[in-house]
Amino acid sequence: MSAAPITRLRPAKARPEESSLRIAMVAPPYFTLPPAGYGGVEAVVADLVDGLVDRGHHVTLVGAGRHRTRAQRFIPTCADPPADQLGEPLPEVLHAARVSRILADCDVDLIHDHTLAGPLLARNRPTPTLVTAHGPVAGEPGEYYRALGDAISLVSISNSQRSGAPDLPWLATVHNAIRVETFPFQAEKEDIALFLGRFHPDKAPHLAIDAARALGMPIVLAGKCSEPLEKDYFQREITPRVGPDVTLFGVADGVAKRDLLRRATCLLFPVCWDEPFGLVMIEAMACGTPVVALRRGSVPEIVVDGSTGVIVDDPAELPDAVHRARKLDPMDCRTHTELHFSTEAMTAGYERVYRKLLAGSPVAASSWAADGWHSVDRRAEAAVQAAS
């Protein structure tokens, strides 16, 4: 993880319009923004940045490598994202240390952090820090956020995720989203099932193979298999199941992913853990492809059972669920995604959270008043009321 020069940000000489905010957006260090292939968090962050800029806000994006967003400023912590070290702690910790140096001279109204290690450095920071928890929060992750106390405020990406630790300092739930218009809708499907995700026991692609094979339906499996746990799982559960009805695609980039999703009869999502969100579900529905899934985590929050997919409780029920999913209307899937999981909806949700955070932040209120601005409490309260 080679270091890039640390760019110091000089305080802005003039503030933006009163209705706009200056936001420092901190992305994880492992992939570019947006990612070329794998990288769900990075994809969400990139879309959020563009959405905020479209709404008139000034965004300073801190990430790794290069970016293709509309952020007015981009500051890399390293020249090349350490994608091959995904899952190792050191790249994240090193990224957090460099981000802390950058933010020390960054004149913004709030910091929105999407990393795990970054919030460790939020205490005593004069700027309020909002953290989106992208992973599970039950158990040890919850203890971590509790230890941070009032140094941060939290946003969940699903109500299911939030229920794992309801006592944490949650400000709101804001669902992840996609740019629906970039996903091709196709009503006429091919007779293939699709699994798209990591080759991991939690994702259980072996159950997807079993379900498709029980129906005599070919299946395509596309996803990441690079970490030791993924490789061990692949050898143990996938290799013995490979046959002429199973196509191993590898990692699908943005173009290939969209092509697979639009053509498939259904997306098989047999998760065996409490998935906090599952971005691939809304990507599939945007293409008019129903989701067949086990009832875990956020699945019932995202998929409308019997309309945009079929949800079951036991893997043995998956083949029949695929049969039922074939009868669903692809347009219902697309419309549901447009209404509930668009980038515009996510951006508006976060904008409301920002106003709420600033309205309750004494530090932000006093600093804005010192600069001759109106009371942040009155201004943010009015903005929240107008948006609700």
Image (cartoon, helix red, strand yellow):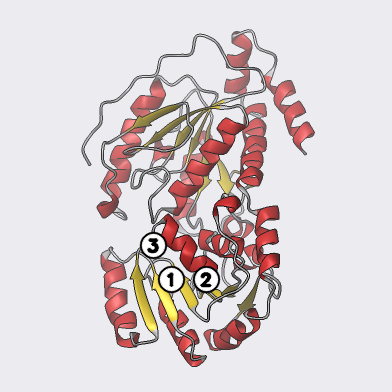
Image position of 249 (left or right of 350): left
Q: Residue at x 52, y 91 (%)?
A: 215
Mark 3 residue crowding within 10 angstroms, few (<14) / some (14–19) / many (20+) = many
Quadrant showing the N terminus: top left
Q: Residue at x 66, y 18 (%)?
A: 18
The answer to whether residue 274 of the structure is visible from this angle is: no
Residue 207's place in the image compared with 80, above or below, is below
Residue 374, x across and y down, in percent: 69, 14
Residue 143's place in the image compared with 80, above or below, is below
Mark 2 residue crowding within 10 angstroms, few (<14) / some (14–19) / many (20+) = many
Residue 290, x across and y down, in percent: 61, 71
Q: CA distance from mark 1 to mark 3?
A: 20 Å
Image position of 360 (left or right of 127): right
Kindly identify which residue carries mark 2: 263
Q: Residue furthest left?
A: 2
Kindly identify which residue carries mark 3: 252
Residue 94, x across and y down, in percent: 28, 39
Q: Residue at x 44, y 47 (%)?
A: 42
Kindly identify which residue carries mark 1: 202
Residue 218's place in the image compared with 147, above or below, is below
Amino acid at the residue labelled 2: Arg
Task: Give residue 359's quadrant in the image.
Answer: top right
Amino acid at the residue labelled 1: Asp
Q: Earlier in the sequence, mark 1 or mark 3?
A: 1
Residue 295, x across and y down, in percent: 59, 74
Amino acid at the residue labelled 3: Ala
Q: CA distance from mark 3 to mark 2?
A: 14 Å
Quadrant showing the C terminus: top right
Element assignment for label 2 = helix
Q: Earlier in the sequence, mark 3 or mark 2?
A: 3
Element assignment for label 3 = loop
Element assignment for label 1 = loop
